[in-house]
Image (cartoon, rainbow, N blue to C red):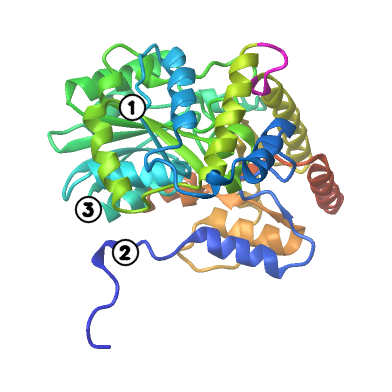
Amino acid sequence: MAKRLQARRLDGIDHNPWVEFVKLASEEADVVNLGQGFPDFSPPEFAVEAFQHAVSGDFMLNQYTKAFGYPPLTKILASFFGKLLGQEIDPLKNVLVTVGAYGALFTAFQALVDEGDEVIIVEPFFDCYEPMTLMAGGRPVFVSLKPSPIQKGEPDSSSNWQLDPTELASKFTSRTKAFILNTPNNPLGKVFSREELELVASLCQQHDVVCITDEVYQWLVFDGFQHISIASLPGMWERTLTIGSAGKTFSVTGWKVGWVLGPDRLMKHLRTVHQNSIYHCATQCQAAVAQSFEREQLHFGQPSSYFVQFPQYIQRCRDHMIQSLQSVGLRPVIPQASYFLITDISDFKNKMPDLPGAADEPYDRRFVKWMIKNKGLMAIPVSTFVSVPHQKFFDHYIRFCFVKDESTLRAMDQKLQKWKAELMP
């Protein structure tokens, strides 16, 4: 055809590294997938039972429900998060149920970001933020978390990675429309402190900027750290969209149920996009999520709470992976939260600088390809989560997912023990 086929909004975002690395792993025999962020074990029994009941119970759950959310779900979300955020949340005006947190993000970008608007994104970032900004016609503006110096031989922690207040303030201009906050952060596992959130809140209020906060890992926080929602800070509810995920909350990533909470002055625009795009999310999945939240509300804060038990179990998985990776000379950055940790591969970069690959290909991408092919382990290069100009600052890190079954972690151990034996003189 002589006519241009693709819309210009797709220019520069057509390559997806996830497709590339998953394909590479599938082509090799017996690769342990520690790259993709999903649990490979059963969800909690109460969630499975809730879904079974939704499928086999009321036959009307096979039909449409209200476009903006199944009423029992919007009601429990309003009640549950209203207490956490210190707000009186209206289920009809302040809650929107979406096709996963991904759908929530896309709806927010399409509703609020206009041609030429600047969107501040903190690096490293969940990789959809940049293309979603571009598709809406916005201009991404990047600011990097930077690690503080540590003593030689001491382990690094995601808490050591900080924003420079002066640099951050310099990114806000008269054209800044939105600030994208991800806490706990993917891929770093950083939990932003109250002091850091107060800095962001002050700048958003000073420059009349909307804060879109992705908090899908808020229940997976370790070592006594505390997640704080920026919408709970003074003056922030009225300018914040808080995004959550049933997939990450109840280990059911395939259900694709997410939500957005926020003031009606923002939410009404998201409802317009939602109404004229996907219109509706799967009723039975929403019903199961509603029942799961109702159960959790009864147990909240008690030892029987899934939000108490699950992070304790996953912290043990995290610690297992950290010790295993250290055994072959990898240097994990200990995460405060989330599904993920990143690990420093600088020592390998010094020893094996000339791995196969294109001359301009970041080292971490070449290393992951080498590791898939030669060590049977899949991770994701951290340069995937940063802007192109800054990839050189992050190309000595790779990301692993530790929310995996014990059998997967044992398979990882076998690969790493073999690797360790090959390293011995």
**Depth check, front residue: 97 or 137:** 97
- Percent x, y of residue 211: 30, 29
Tell me, yes or no, whether the two marked residues, 2 and 1, touch with CB atoms within 8 Å: no
In the image, 68: left or right of 375?
A: left
In the image, is residue 307 above or below residue 233? below
Which residue is tagged 1?
Answer: 94
In the image, the segment drawn in magenta is 302-307
Label 3 crowd bin: few (<14), some (14–19), many (20+), radius 10 Å: some
How far is disc 2 from disc 1 in space, using C-alphas? 31 Å
User: In the image, which disc is placed on residue 118?
Assistant: none
Which residue is tagged 3?
Answer: 137
Which residue lies most toward the left here? 174
On the rendered image, what quadrant is the N terminus found in?
bottom left
How far is disc 1 from disc 3 in space, using C-alphas? 26 Å
Q: Is residue 128 within the magenta segment? A: no
Label whose residue precedes the other's in the sequence (2 or 1): 2
Label whose residue precedes the other's in the sequence (3 or 2): 2
Label whose residue precedes the other's in the sequence (1 or 3): 1
**Depth check, front residue: 377 or 301:** 301
User: In the image, which disc is placed on residue 10?
Assistant: 2
- What kind of residue is marked 3? Gly
Query: What secondary structure is the stretch in magenta mostly built from?
Result: loop
In the image, 56: left or right of 74?
A: right
- What kind of residue is marked 1? Asn
